[in-house]
Amino acid sequence: MEHNLKEFFDKALKEVSLDCTVFGFHEGELKVLLLRWKGTDGWSLPGGHILLDESADDAANRILTQRTGLSDVYLQQFHTFGNVNRYIYHPEKELLEKLEATFGKGFFDGIIFRRVVSIGYFALVEFDQVQPTPDWFTDECRWWSLAEVPNLLFDHNEMIERALKALRQRARNYPIGYNLLPEKFTMPELQRLYETILDRQFDRRNFQKLIMSYDILERLDEKRIGAANKSPYLYRFVKEKYDEAGATGISFSM
Amino acid sequence: MEHNLKEFFDKALKEVSLDCTVFGFHEGELKVLLLRWKGTDGWSLPGGHILLDESADDAANRILTQRTGLSDVYLQQFHTFGNVNRYIYHPEKELLEKLEATFGKGFFDGIIFRRVVSIGYFALVEFDQVQPTPDWFTDECRWWSLAEVPNLLFDHNEMIERALKALRQRARNYPIGYNLLPEKFTMPELQRLYETILDRQFDRRNFQKLIMSYDILERLDEKRIGAANKSPYLYRFVKEKYDEAGATGISFSM
DNA sequence: TTTTCAATGCGTAAATTTTACACAAAGAAA
DNA sequence: TTTCTTTGTGTAAAATTTACGCATTGAAAA
């Protein structure tokens, strides 16, 4: 399907692309999904081009579905990157040579390596549900801890930084967690998510009070057993209330 | 310079444009700058295309300078509009016919009326300093009260709405006013600006206390005379402190 | 010239929100 | 059975936000 670049670009916008920073939460850490380009050790964010009959949001959803196996993930546009030099942050020449060794000499001529404006999205997904899937351009797709993200191709490190800022702003003004946590979770787990995203600690009693005051959580009659301590209750988001608060906005002030 | 579309698009990105919502504050009201297309009564936001050797931000600045006569205005990107149908919100056919009557039959064929992704910026300017200037595409450029903005071409009404939301968010999290007010202003004038942007009233004593607590204003030894009441003091932003607060962010909570 | 009137300058009390903090109970491991 | 870590719950202090009164000013009206 996408094996012939010229054919593909007859059906897609050339000068605009989009890139997604996909956030997952696992073992108390934020993770992002990265792709390794075929025959190289260069990593980048998942992304792609917008088809002619598709909106930017639709394209982001399509690409996300292809990379994760999930449909209907939480997606938010946060910034559009339009610097002239956004494709020369890294030693492109070496990369190009390696890619041409894989795809054939001249394969990319005049197509990819021009300035492209890229719309940045971030996505929130449930870590365990994701099936990381490379695209035709890459041969590896996997999670990276945010702290261990290497130097990426293009301006993708900057994209992740901005995505993180946007995520933090989101977390301060709207409820968060529905898309990142499994259906049932404990209060300490939710607190750890907030602490990780906002990069600060909270008093566990005050945290519980504040979160419960939003009236978006339901405490279940189950507990999480197995740990060497008192079993914590399990909670679940009440979708309607959560969405309501998501429309109105709340202020997470702590 | 821009009289030949094909020549122009050899030097610019075609599939991406940008549009600016320019906010001014005058007589207690927010105003926006609109352009009327040549030979029609269709109005739109000022906008244009990005040159090949130019970043999106540079392009926005260039276009803004051309439309207002000002350089270094406050500019903020807030959203990118990528809907497939963003060019068919209005009766394009009639518009096209009128335009062709002005510019010549076939002038726009295959160039303008395809889907273009547009980066939305909003700008804050000092009302009195602006010299509204039409571009080669339009023959009128003037201020409109926000409340009286007519049905605009394309998705520009939606753009203004989103720009206003972004402006409000900005005003809640960062100091605002430096770019919208003249150098010297009274406290009630600043308060009216905040009330207009945020669309609510504040207690004048509490407003003064809160604003002064940010330590970004300097009270001058002058007063505004002429009105039939006690003369209010004049204030001025202390640029360094204002920028500092702009970098850190404040929370306008009232 | 004096009076009137609307708007400004300044300060304090009440209400609400945020922060700080302690002890009993549960459950696996020792 | 004891130990150890973590959870569940409530209250007081501190800080912030809101509500509000009164004297003063300056142009306009009398």
Image (cartoon, coloured by chain):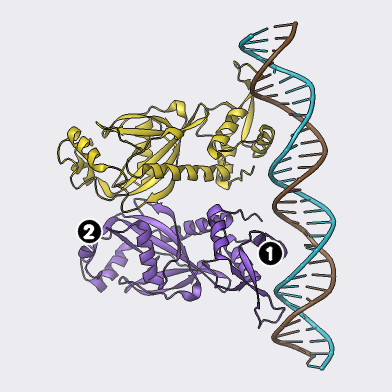
Chain colours: A yellow, B purple, C cyan, D brown
Q: Residue at x 47, y 58 (%)?
A: B163
Q: Earlier in the sequence, mark 1 or mark 2?
A: 2
Q: Quadrant of residue D27?
A: bottom right
Q: Is residue B246 left or right of residue A150?
A: right
| Residue B249 locus on image (x, y percent) | 56, 53
**At numbered mark 1, what does the secondary structure look like: helix, strand or loop?**
helix
Q: Nearer the viewer, residue A72 or A67?
A: A67
Label 2 sits on residue = B110
The chain letter for the residue carrying disc 1 is: B
Q: Which mark is residue B208?
A: 1
Real-space CA distance between mark 1 and mark 2, rounded to the nearest whole angstrom:
56 Å
Q: Is residue B143 visible?
A: yes
Secondary structure at numbered mark 2: loop
Residue type for callout 1? Gln
Percent x, y of residue C13: 85, 56
Return the residue found at the far left: A105
Q: Are marks 1 and 2 on the same chain?
A: yes
Q: Is residue A204 left or right of residue B154?
A: right
Which x, y percent locates residue A36? 31, 32
Three-letter amino acid code at disc 2? Answer: Gly
How many discs mark residues in the rendered view?
A: 2
Image-quadrant location for residue B190:
bottom right
Residue A223 locus on image (x, y percent):
63, 20
